[in-house]
């Protein structure tokens, strides 16, 4: 395929390199140079008509502008948008732009929704919970990103910390819960929010949900999955409750407790610093109500698999429904408003009144 990559920073350049290695032709666009074109409008019309898919990996605040440029050039474009889809205030305009170009198809990049590890974990939970209701779900995504922030990366002045990991965490939760429970969760106000950000939600129609993320390396639930890390130094960092500045350790897991006491866990990258390809090995562990344990390693590059899967979905569809995950963006906008008073002006009420673009 011929694929245009708009924005060749850290993630965009990774996508372009990977696509070239897998035999695709790439066209790169970035005003900062080191690309084929500085702007979408500079791409010759004949070349633009031959582009099979577009990947937008520019800063969130530019997504709407870039999408408009693409759709003016190619009204039936297939577009993969990095998350979040747009600023909270721009979501209504984004949905309007999609509706006004019915031949186009737009997907928001959902890496964890296409993860083989997440899907195996969710399948295990569905089997275990058929006659044993889920009591609680805990999801944590923690990393010390301060070195990245100091270097000018991962700075989201609109969604704040919610803009980094929460879309991924919601994707894991969406795969784990049944659809009705997940909808009830998204429609319920959190019971407790702390500033770092720990969110507990309880309500009718879904189990207790604890979501936690930290960019400062502050660990929320060390006791749940810290023991699953095989490297002794990594275990010590988690046990002490803090990932040091500059460390590449990521503490990410999902954990489900059933009413009987049975449990299921998904731990990402448990072999950190213990095997060469640790970033591409994840573990699903289950403990039955009788205490029987089972462990399954899941191998594969989640980022690359999600990229190819979604490009296949985009280019294989004749028109089709765009999916920008409006309920998740509403949730993130409201959470950002609640944890960061400086964003209180964002019109999140507008988001609640939008018609769905997607199922």
Image: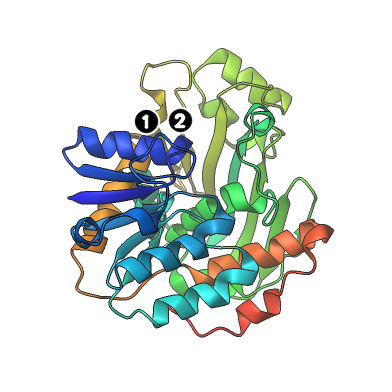
Whether residue 51 sits left or right of residue 32 in the image: it is left
Rendered residue at 30%/50% (across/down): 4
* Residue 260 showing in the rendered view: no
Rendered residue at 20%/43% (across/down): 25
Q: Position of residue 72 (x, y in %)?
A: 36, 70
Q: Is residue 226 above or below residue 313?
A: above
* Residue 187 showing in the rendered view: yes
Q: Position of residue 272 (x, y in %)?
A: 48, 22
- Which residue in the structure is indicated by mark 1? 281
Number of numbered discs on residues: 2
> Which corner quadrant of the image does residue 294 belong to?
top left
User: Residue placed farthest to the right in the image?
Assistant: 341
Q: Residues within 10 Å of mark 2 (few under 14, many from 20)?
A: many
Contact? badges 1 and 2 (CB < 8 Å): yes
Mark number for residue 152? none
- Mark 1: secondary structure: strand
Whether residue 317 sits left or right of residue 124 in the image: it is left
Q: Position of residue 107 (x, y in %)?
A: 38, 63
Mark number for residue 269? 2
Q: Position of residue 43 (x, y in %)?
A: 31, 54
- Mark 2: secondary structure: loop
Quadrant (top left, top right, bottom left, bottom right) of the C terminus: bottom left
The mark that comes first in sequence, 1 or 2, is 2
Estimate the spatial distance between the alpha carbons at disc 1 and disc 2, rounded to whole Å.
Answer: 6 Å
Q: Is residue 280 above or below residue 62?
A: above
Q: Residues within 10 Å of mark 1 (few under 14, many from 20)?
A: many
């Amino acid at each position: 395929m011929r694929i245009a990559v708009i924005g060749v920073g850290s993630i965009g350049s990774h996508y372009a390199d990977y696509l070239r290695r897998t035999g695709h032709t790439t066209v790169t666009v970035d005003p900062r140079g080191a690309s084929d074109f500085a702007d979408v409008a500079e791409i010759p019309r004949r070349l633009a008509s031959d582009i099979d898919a577009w990947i937008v990996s520019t800063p969130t605040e530019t997504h709407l502008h870039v999408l408009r440029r693409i759709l003016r050039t190619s009204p039936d474009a297939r577009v993969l948008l990095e998350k979040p889809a747009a600023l909270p205030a721009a979501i209504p305009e984004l949905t309007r732009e999609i509706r006004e170009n019915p031949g186009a198809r737009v997907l928001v990049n959902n890496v964890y929704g296409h993860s083989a590890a997440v899907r195996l974990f969710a399948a295990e939970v569905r089997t275990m919970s058929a006659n044993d209701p889920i009591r609680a779900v805990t999801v944590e995504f923690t990393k010390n990103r301060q070195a990245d922030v100091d270097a000018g990366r991962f700075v989201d002045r609109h969604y704040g910390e919610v803009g980094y990991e929460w879309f991924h965490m919601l994707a894991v939760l969406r795969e784990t819960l049944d659809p009705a429970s997940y909808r009830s969760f998204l429609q319920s106000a959190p019971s407790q929010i702390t500033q770092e950000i720990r969110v507990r939600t309880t309500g009718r129609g879904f189990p207790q949900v604890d979501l936690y993320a930290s960019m400062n390396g502050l660990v929320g639930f060390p006791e749940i999955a810290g023991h699953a890390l095989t490297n002794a130094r990594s275990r010590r960092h988690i046990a002490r409750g803090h990932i040091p500045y500059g460390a590449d350790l990521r503490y990410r897991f999902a954990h489900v407790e059933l009413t009987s006491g049975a449990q299921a866990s998904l731990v990402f990258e448990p072999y950190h610093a213990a095997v060469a390809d640790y970033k591409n090995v994840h573990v699903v562990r289950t403990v039955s109500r009788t205490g029987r344990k089972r462990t399954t390693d899941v191998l594969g590059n989640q980022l690359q698999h999600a990229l190819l899967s979604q490009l296949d979905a985009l280019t294989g569809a004749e028109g089709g429904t765009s999916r920008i995950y409006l309920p998740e963006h509403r949730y993130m906008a409201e959470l950002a408003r609640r944890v960061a008073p400086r964003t209180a002006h964002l019109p999140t009420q507008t988001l609640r009144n939008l018609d769905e673009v997607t199922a």
